[in-house]
Amino acid sequence: MMSRLRQWWHYTFLGVLGALIFFCLSLTPSLLPRGVVLQGIVSGITAAIGYGVGVLLGWLAGKLSDRSLPRARPVAWRGLAIVAVPVVVFFLYQGSQWQREVHSLMGMAAPSRFGALGVLLIAAVTGAGLVGLMRLLRSAARAVGRLLSRWIPASTAGVIAGSAVALLALGVLNGVVIDGLFAVTDTAFRDINNETEPGVAPPDDPLRSGGPGSLVSWASLGNQGRQFVAGGPDPQQLSDFGGARVQRPIRVYAGLDSAPTSRERARLAVQELQRTGAFQRDVLLVITTTGTGWVDENGVVPLEYMYHGDTAMVALQYSYLPSWLSFLVDKERAREAGRDLYNQVYAVWSRMPLSARPKLLVFGESLGSFGAESAFGGADDIRNRVDGMLLVGPPNRNPLWREYVADRDPGTTEILPGYEQGATVRFARDPAIDLDGPGTAWATPRVVYLQHPSDPIVWWAPRLAVSRPDWLREPRGPDVSPAVRWYPFVTFWQVTADMAFSTGVPAGHGHSYGTAPVTAWAAIAPPDGWTPRRTADLTALLSTS
C-alpha cells in the first residue's frame, strides 16, 4: 500500500523541470491584467502542461536510446531544489512587477505584491490535480492492458488499452462534462433572455418594435431586444444637442422567438422597416448583434445624434449565449443572421430610385462583426453594396479581416495594418489619430475596423499555442507591456484567460471601446456640415451618459 502511495506521489525529474520552467514563464505578462485567482489557475494549467512535456521528452529519449533513462539521483534533486527556490521567488516577484506595469498601462490601480503567495498556492493545487488526473487515466490504461494481455500480445494490448481509455475519457469529457456544462449554461442564459431589466417597459412609440402596431411582439424580443427598442435618445435629447428639426429614431428588432428561422426573422424585420417608413429615412443601419443579442449603444447612438434622429436601425437576434460561447456552438448562426438580414434589406433598398435611397450602413461588434462580414465577399463587394461599415473588436477568425491583415501593405504592422493604401478599408486603435494616416484619398464607401493592441478577442487563435504571430514579432502597442513575449503553449493559455475578462478594463483597452465609434462614424458617414468640434461634443456627451 505504502509503495503504491509513494509511486502515486513520485514525480519524474524531467517532468518537474518542465513544470518549473512553464510555471515561471506563465508569470510573464500578457495583454491584460490578471488577478491572483486567474493567474494561479493559468500557472497551474501551464505547469501541468510543462510536466507533461518533460515526461514526454524523457520517454522519447529513452525510446531513441533503446533503454529507459535512469532515475535522477538525490544530488540532482537537491540541485534542482537549490536552483528552483530562488528562481521561483524571483519570477513571483518579477511577475508582480509586470502585473503592476500592465495595470498602470490600463490606468488601473496596482495590485498588492502579497498576491504572489496566493498565486503559488493555487497553481500548486491546480497543477498537482491535473497531473494526478492524468496519472489516474494512465493507471486505468495499464490495468486494462494487463487484462487484455492474457489473450493478445502485451504491446498490442497496451496500444489498445491506451486508446480505449483515451477515447473513453474524451467521450466522458465531451458527452458528460462539456454537454452538461453547455446544458446548464444554455438554461441559465435562456432564463436571462426571458427576463426584462428593471425600468425597461414596452414602448408607446409605433416606430419601435414591440410598440403599437408592431408586427413583432414585445414578449418575443428577448432581454437584449427589449433594451434596444426601449433605448436611445428621445427627441428632447436630440434637440438639446443641437438638432433644429429632429425626428423620433426608428428602432426595429426581431428576437429568437419572433420567428422560427433566421430567414423568417429577417423577413419579419424588413416588414417592420417598411411599416415604420425606415426606407424613407436619411440613414438605415443594419446591425449584427453579439451572441446574446446585445447592441452596444455607444456603437449606434452616435448616428442618431449626428442625423437628428432621421435614422432607422434594425437588428436580429440569433442566440442568447455570450459571444465567446456562441462562437463555439452558434458561429454559423451568426454568419446566417448577418447574411440573411443584410441581403433582405439590400433587396428592398436596391430597388429604390438612387435619389430616394437612405445611406445604407453596417455595424457589428465582436462576434457581430463576424456576422456582418458574412454578407460580403470582399472589398469589391463592399464597395458595390454598402455606403459605410464599422466593425469593432473583430475576432481573429473573421475571414475578411484575416484576408485584409494577411495582404496588408508592406511596412505596416498586424496591430495597425494598411490595406490597399486605405482606399476603402482602414484600421484604427484610436480613430482620431489613425484614420488620417494613409496617403491615398479615402473614397466612399468607407470601412473601419477598430482594434486595440491589448484586445485578446482580436488576437486569440488556436495556432497561438505553437506559432508566434506577427503581432508578437512587431513592436508592442502602446497599452501592451514591452515584456510580453511568445512562449509555446504558455502564451496561448495566457491570452485564453485574458478573453474571460476582456471587457473588465477601462475604455480604450482590451475589448472595451467606449465612445471611439463616435469618431469612427464621423469619418465613415459624416452628415453635411459636421465638424470635428461636433465630434468632440458628442464624445463628451456620451462619455458622461
Image (cartoon, helix red, strand yellow):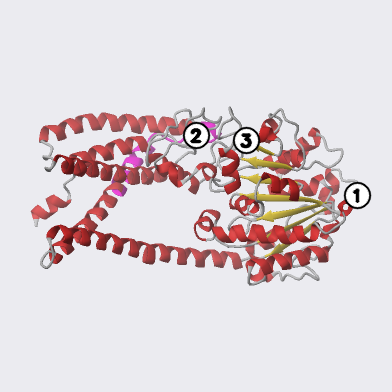
x, y percentage for residue 384? 75, 48
x, y percentage for residue 31? 49, 37
Left or right of residue 149, residue 192 in this image: right
Q: Is residue 515 magenta?
A: no
Q: Mark 2 or mark 3, which is nearer the start of the sequence?
A: 3
Instruction: From the image, tell me which residue sits under label 3.
Output: 429
* Tag 3 and tag 2, C-beta contact below 8 Å: no
Q: Nearer the viewer, mark 3 or mark 2?
A: 2
Instruction: From the image, tell me which residue sits under label 1.
Output: 245
3D distance between C-alphas at marks 1 and 3: 34 Å
x, y percentage for residue 244? 91, 46
Instruction: From the image, tell me which residue sits under label 2.
Output: 470
The residue nearer to you, when weighing 250 against 476, is 476
Query: Which residue shows up at 84% across the image and 45% down it?
Result: 240
Judged from this view, the residue extending furthest toward the right is 245
Q: Secondary structure at mark 3?
A: loop
Amino acid carrying mark 2 in the image: Asp
Residue 89: give its label: none
Q: Secondary structure at mark 1?
A: loop
Q: Nearer the viewer, mark 1 or mark 2?
A: 2
Amino acid carrying mark 1 in the image: Arg
> Which stretch did the figure color magenta?
102-126
* Tag 1 and tag 3, C-beta contact below 8 Å: no
